Amino acid sequence: MQSILTNSGIKSQVVEFEQSTHTSAEAAAAIGCSVAEIAKSILFRGRQSGTPIMVVACGSNRVSEKKVATLIGEKLERADADFVRDATGYVIGGVAPVGHARPVHLLLDEDLQQFRRIWAAAGTPFSVFPLTPGELSTLTGASWANVRQE
């Protein structure tokens, strides 16, 4: 992950922890930030196409599958651990927003834009990296969207 950040011109360092950063709450506790500042990766599968669809969401938000399905134009299914690993190359709890094993349709939760700095998984359930919302957008090339469950 560090090489992806460096090659993208993002001046961020991957941080490794001894304790788990598998969940948003665990990551926030390890880092010392709010759960909302965690950019969590949620993966779905397009019901008809089988396409991997990832939402990088604000850690305190629940993602509305209905909103995401409307934005994508396809009904969604939950992705199981095998699908997540096959599509991204990462295990659940460490899925980074970039560096995936195959193309993934990405959406960014617009609520992340309220923070100066956010933290994303860096490929393992024990690593994260800080970046700004603008850097996340540049790094992923993804669009901001309202994906929060009301």
Image (cartoon, grey):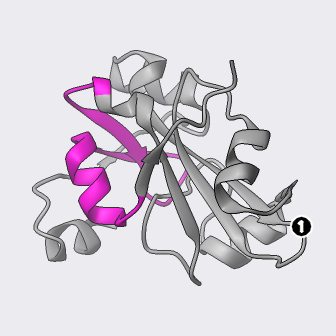
- Residue 64 in picture, x, y percent from top left: 72, 35
Towards the viewer: 32 or 70: 70
Quick check: 69 above or below 111? Answer: below
Residue 53: say if magenta. Answer: no
- Residue 56 in picture, x, y percent from top left: 51, 47
Quick check: 74 above or below 16? Answer: below
Residue 115: say if magenta. Answer: yes
Q: Which region is colored magenta?
A: 114-142
Q: Which residue is mark 1?
A: 47
Quick check: 121 above or below 147? Answer: below
Q: Is residue 41 left or right of residue 50?
A: left
Quick check: 87 above or below 75? Answer: below
At 19% across and 52% down in the image, what residue appears?
Answer: 13
Which quarter of the rendered picture does the C terminus lie within?
top right
Crowd rating for badge 1 (residues with CA inside 10 Å; few <14, some 14–19, many 20+) = some
Q: Is residue 14 shown to the viewer in this render?
A: no
